[in-house]
Image (cartoon, grey):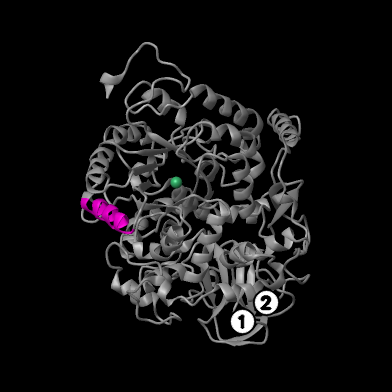
Amino acid sequence: MSDNVKMTALRYESDRPRAKNPVKIMDLSLRDGHQSLFATRGRTEDMIPVAELMDEIGFWAIETWGGATFDTMHRFLNEDPWERLRTLKRYIKKTPFSMLLRAQNLVGYRNYADDLALAFVERAAENGMDVFRTFDALNDYRNFETVVKQIKKSGKHFQGCICYTLTEPRLGGEVYNLDYYVAKARALEDMGADSICVKDMAGLMAPYDAYPLIKALKAAVKAPIHLHSHFTSGMSPMTHLKAIEAGVDIIDTCMTPYAYRTSHAAVEPLVMALLGTNRDTGFDIKKLAEINEILEKQVMPKYKHLLDDSKVSIIDINVLLHQTPGGMLSNLVNQLREMDALDKIDEVYRELPRVRKDLGQIPLVTPTSQIVGVQTVNNVLHDTPEERYRMITGQVKDLCYGLYGKTAVPINPELQKKALKGYPRGEEPITCRPAEVLEPELEKAKAEIGDLAADIDDVILYAQFPVTGRKFLEWKYGRSEPPASVRPTTLEKVKKRDELVKKALAGELIEKKADNPVKTANLRTFNVFVDGEYFNVEVDPVGGPVVPAPPVQGTAPAPVAVSAPAPVTAPAASAPAAAPAQPSGDVAGTLLLAPMPGMIVKYLKSVGDTVAKGETIVILEAMKMENALTAPCDGVVKAVPFKSGDTVAKGASLCVIG
Ligand code: CO
């Protein structure tokens, strides 16, 4: 392509001669960009200042929705996800919108029933979605059938994804080799894919694997080939260039402030690199610079505190070493930190490929990355030399049952048998399309949420997020006051905060005491919210007995009998010394303690119920995984101190059995 480069008379502006085969660009700033860098906290009001300018660039599409946005918006931002779509559509009129659709998982974390899947896609299309970038974590395209039917019916663009994953340092090996990807592309074309995306969510694709891969895909199918390759490992700009030389049609990039680290390469260097070649994007680089200027001045100050600045390096070498998404690795680190087990990280790295292999060498992408990650941590923390998989998450059980689809290689039969022992849907795994065993759920959701839902969009939100969705609808319709933590910040406030930080760093705010007192066993952790800011505060009472604060009831420590060490199904109780035994009123009995911090999804037992050891008492959501916590002993439920939606600390007493 270099022979097409003319070094003279090239212009930055878009009125330069058009290339023969311009690379098309999709911008991801407004979805994957802030999802990757700023914990998906991007607010609609911060997208509007650049929306009209972005519409002028000539992007093939702008990704605006899907992935984690639906979840975080209603949960943390008090924003209606449907409203974002309609609002942005008023500013971005020419450029098509793209969304990331997790196939039958929609924008949630499990397979939903067909009726909900159809309704979701239909409403997304009617609210303004154009391109449905669809992926399945297992690359099991039976999970595409229902949503694709509706994408086509709504007259929209079906982009089929192949999740790119490896079991070796480079493309190849037994499972994920060139033949695998070509076969997947053909399968997508047979399903009517309007374009095919190779989704390299972990940034694993090496430039010299991209070249033969894109060549092979271009030779095998007619549909345009789209490359989505995260920067995480640092390879993606090189990978982009080799993919472009191999004839890739569309590349994903971000505006500079949303680029690099675990996000994507920036668009501007690519535009310059291709300027004057036969693959010139034709973009006006001055216009791009104008957008950057606005973002830097008006938007990024509100988000920069969310950047992970724990390291100077913007590249995650661990990704190259472990072939694992960077987001998953940081989740694992956070999870271990919350459990005071950060010293176990090397064990986790060793255990992870074993768990993945046991679970059928599945790709690592939401939600399978969480499934493999959380199970790995569980194994490292709770397994004994005599017994592996002592605490199996609900999602691993579902995966073993076949509820996520077919794995790349069969699941370890021993693990499968153990996971399915007493599994409510049956102990025999299924081989059909997973949604075929799911009962319709839309009407049930409608009945449950009742008049709190004003329209079908509310119902669809609630159906996917029953706990946080209900909370959000209560805020939306004024039934309860949203907490200060979900309010947007302003540039004004950011300025004040920055000044305070500066003073604090200069030592002007705090008088340092000579000796720090030693933390005692009475230490309690509180979440404190001040004017939209969130602080985690540890309080250690000075002198005298502890007076526990709400939500734990009671004023004096009750006599507590913690169950015998090492019960099979209640790992929390197996480490009584580590868990601060919080009194639950003055009820005596055996405590079921939270093995990790999380949110109560629901209690399956209430006060007065007789329970047998091993019966599920409560479902606790932690790191987006649901954990069924079981009775550590036989008895009668004496106290249930929390309710659905409550956030609990590690070691909180979730149930007292007497
Ligand atoms: Co991505």
Q: Residue furthest bottom?
A: 610
Mark positioned earlier in the residue sequence (2 or 1): 1
Given the image, on which type of amino acid does mark 2 rest?
A: Val
Give left or right: position of 71 versus 27: right
Residue 183 within the segment the image draws in magenta: yes
Residue 573 drawn at (x, y percent): 55, 72
Residue 67 is marked as none
Residue 605 is marked as 1
Residue 144 drawn at (x, y percent): 39, 62
For label 1, the SS is loop
Give left or right: position of 493 versus 213: right
| Quadrant holding the N terminus | top left
- The answer to whether marks 2 and 1 mark residues whose Cβ atoms lie closer than 8 Å is yes
Note whether 607 is above or below 262 in the view shown. Answer: below
> Is residue 340 something that shows in the picture?
no
Please give the name of the residue rendered at 50% of the width and 60% of the height, measured from the top-left corner.
121
Q: CA distance from mark 2 to mark 1?
A: 9 Å
Please give the name of the residue rendered at 44% of the width and 62% of the height, measured from the top-left corner.
147
Magenta span of residues: 179-191
Residue mark closest to the camera, 2 vs 1? 1
Residue 601 drawn at (x, y percent): 60, 69
For label 2, the SS is loop
Please give the name of the residue rendered at 70% of the width and 51% of the height, measured from the top-left corner.
486
The residue carrying pointer 2 sits among few (fewer than 14), some (14 to 19) or many (20 or more) residues within 10 Å by Cα, namely some
Residue picked out by circle 2: 640
